[in-house]
Image (tube, grey):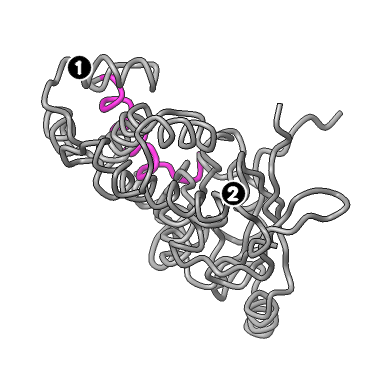
């Protein structure tokens, strides 16, 4: 099927550009260079990218940065370090974009995730449907009883 | 009245490898990752736009429901591609196919127009297979 599809080469180029953003989001990416490398005019590139991914390349870059910021924060990386690690230079613009996309500011999200992580460590069975616990004997294997003392 | 699916279970051969596959290749998000003692971890992921559905990546290890013989049978069945636990959808099947292929995901069937829709089939790192369809364009 794909061999018969006349525009598959266009998909490959746009997908390569998307994957480039996925792996280089933390760098100072010039989206003009991406369209050049994909052999598109800037206009054509943006139009096709948006058609496939529902976002312009710039919007997608911001989305990937914030998505990765949530992962870092979940892993306990402080907010200011996260901001720079994912490619933002300004903490205020990072916080504003983060709040717009995630629905809360980064420091609140950090505190919430730390609390959640603590609960998962101390009371893991609280996060598991009981049928799985009983059917698979998870309570026998878990460290639940030890750490909850 | 049943209203929703909240959890589904995918049996995996290696939980760490499955974690890498489902997050880094498929782009799913981790919902719960709770340590359960030596060799056990409760790990659930969700498709990026469906946070309310937790897919449990359940490791095939001896204990609980899996006695030694049952474990071997189940492991062989998973590895041999017996199970197709779910149908996923995406906004653009050709683009998603190209992306997943570039990330090393193995497809049993490339995007194909069927009478019921546009569909591809891929397998996870354990051997489970999934149908990948395209959402109807509005």
Q: Nearer the viewer, residue B102 or B4?
A: B102
Horizontal side of A23 relative to A136 (left or right) equals left
Q: Is residue A120 magenta?
A: yes
Q: Mark 1 or mark 2: which is in front?
A: 1
B75 horizontally vs B41: left or right: right
The secondary structure type at the circle numbered 1 is helix
Quick check: can you spot residue B130? no
Tell me where residue B68 appears, x and y as whole percent: 62, 83
Q: Give how far apart the Cα atoms at labels 1 and 2 are.
A: 34 Å
In this rendering, position of residue A128 left or right of residue A69: right
Q: Which residue is mark 2?
A: B55
Residue A93 position in % (x across, y down): 20, 17
Give the x, y percent position of residue B10.
62, 59
Q: Nearer the viewer, residue B55 or B36?
A: B55
Q: What is the quadrant of the C terminus of chain A in the image?
A: top left
Q: Which of the chains bears the disc numbered 1?
A: A
| Quarter of the figure with the N terminus of chain A | bottom right
Which mark is drawn over residue A93?
Answer: 1
Q: Position of residue A148 (x, y in %)?
A: 37, 43
Look at the image and give the residue range highlighted in magenta.
A108-126
Please, is residue B57 above or below residue A10 in the view?
A: below
The quarter holding residue B71 reads: bottom right
Q: Residue at x 36, y 42 (%)?
A: A122
Residue A6: quarter of image: bottom right
Mark 1 neighbour density, 10 Å: few (under 14) some (14–19) many (20 or more): few
Q: Nearer the viewer, residue A21 or B77?
A: A21
């Amino acid at each position: 099927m794909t061999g018969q599809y006349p525009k598959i080469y266009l998909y490959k180029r746009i997908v390569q550009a998307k994957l480039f953003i996925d792996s280089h989001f933390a760098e100072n990416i010039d989206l003009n260079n991406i369209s050049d490398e994909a052999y598109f005019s800037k206009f054509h590139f943006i139009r096709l990218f948006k058609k496939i991914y529902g976002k312009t390349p710039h919007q997608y870059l911001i989305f990937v940065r914030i998505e990765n910021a949530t992962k870092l924060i979940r892993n306990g990386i402080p907010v200011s370090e996260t901001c720079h690690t994912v490619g933002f230079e300004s903490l205020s613009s990072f916080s504003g974009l983060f709040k717009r996309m995630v629905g809360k500011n980064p420091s609140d999200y950090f505190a919430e995730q730390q609390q959640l992580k603590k609960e998962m460590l101390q009371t893991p069975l609280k996060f598991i449907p009981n049928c799985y616990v009983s059917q698979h004997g998870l309570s026998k294997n878990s460290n639940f009883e030890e750490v909850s003392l | 009245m049943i209203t929703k699916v909240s959890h589904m279970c995918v049996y995996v051969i290696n939980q760490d490898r499955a974690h890498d596959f489902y997050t880094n290749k498929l782009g799913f998000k981790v919902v719960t990752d709770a340590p359960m003692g030596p060799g056990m971890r409760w790990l659930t992921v969700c498709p990026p736009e469906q946070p309310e559905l937790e897919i449990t990546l359940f490791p095939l290890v001896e204990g609980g429901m899996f006695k030694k013989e049952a474990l071997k049978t189940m492991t062989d069945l998973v590895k041999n591609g017996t199970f197709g636990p779910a149908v996923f959808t995406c906004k653009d099947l050709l683009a998603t196919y190209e992306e997943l292929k570039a990330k090393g995901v193995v497809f049993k069937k490339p995007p194909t127009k069927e009478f019921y829709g546009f569909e591809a089939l891929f397998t996870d790192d354990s051997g489970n297979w999934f149908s990948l369809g395209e959402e109807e364009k509005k």
